[in-house]
Each structure stands twice: as structure tokens, then as C-alpha cells.
Amino acid sequence: MPHSYVVTGAGRGIGRAVALRLAQEGLWAAVAGDAAEEAVAEEAADAAEQRGALGGWVNNAAVFGDADLHDTPPARMTELITANLAPTVTGCAGSCGPVPAAPSSTSPPTRPGAPCPAPRPMPPPKRPWKG
């Protein structure tokens, strides 16, 4: 069975292009509304998983409008960042499960050109709000 995906912000722009490209590749994409709400995220993931194993979650939705970092009051900018980050956290937590711990500070290479350590495998996807 092919993988399926959830795409937020698929109503227009880049999100729409991503969803259409997935369809062109023969993959199925569920379109999520307000993925900051666990119920919406769960519904989107369930819909995707009915078509195949959840292969990815594209966090594309954003609401910045015409906000300019230099002209927008800090409190408003904080509200916008929170509004954009919450769906990303909810979607990632629901589709990927916990993020593996970073390697210890002694793991990264200490000299230029040294090879990076091999990436650690990710745990299988699980949705923590499911029983």
C-alpha cells in the first residue's frame, strides 16, 4: 500500500502545489484545517492512514499577512509566531512521535572536514493522543 500524507495550508500557494504533486506521484494527501487543534490533526491523520501508511506531514499553513518584523509590535509578532508554531508542534507530535535525543556534545566532529556521525534511526510514527 502506498504512503499517504497530511498537508496543511493546501488551499493555495505552496501547500496546494505540494498536494497536487503528491497526487501526480500517485500518493494520497489529506488536507488539514486548523491543525493546532488535536481533534483536527487526528482526523487528518486518520483520513490519510485510511489510504496508506502515514509517510509524512507537511506543515505549510502560516498566517503572517503583511506583518513586518520592524513595524509590528513585539506582542503582535509573538501572537503570530505562536499561531504558526502550534499547528506545527501538534502535527509533528502526532505524526512522528517523540523526537530522539540529540547526540552528546562529544559526538559532533571537532575538526573541519571530519565526517559527521551516522544519523540515528527515527522511532516508528505514533500518535500520542491515540489510546
Image (spheres, rainbow, N blue to C red):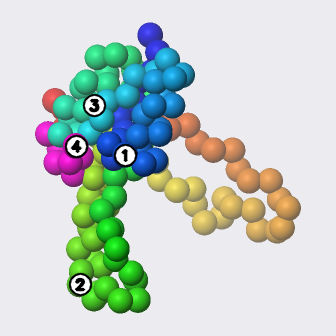
Query: Residue 84, labelled with which disc?
Result: none
Mark positioned earlier in the residue sequence (3 or 2):
3
Q: Residue at x 48, y 28 (%)?
A: 22
The amino acid pointed to by label 2 is Ala
In the rendered image, is residue 116 in sight? yes
Which of the numbered marks, if any, corresponds to residue 12?
1
Q: Residues within 10 Å of mark 3 (few under 14, many from 20)?
A: many
Query: Disc 1 residue type?
Result: Arg
Front-most of residues 96 and 103: 96
Is the C-beta separation of discs 1 and 4 under 8 Å?
Answer: no
Whether residue 92 is visible: no
Of label 1 and label 3, which has the lower sequence position? 1
Report the residue marked by disc 2: 75
**In this figure, which residue is indicated by the disc labeled 4?**
33
Can you tell which of label 1 and label 3 is closer to the viewer? 1
- Closest to the observer, 26 or 103: 26
- In the rendered image, residue 12, in percent from the top left (x then y), is placed at 37, 46
User: Is residue 93 shown in magenta?
Assistant: no
Crowd class of label 2 (few under 14; some 14 to 19; many from 20; radius 10 Å): few
User: Does the CB distance between marks 3 and 2 fall below 8 Å?
Assistant: no
What residue is rendered at 34% in x and 58% in y? Answer: 62
Which residue ends up furthest to the right in the rendered image? 113
Question: Dot 3 corresponds to which residue?
Answer: 45
Q: Nearer the viewer, mark 3 or mark 2?
A: 2
Residue 34 among magenta residues:
yes
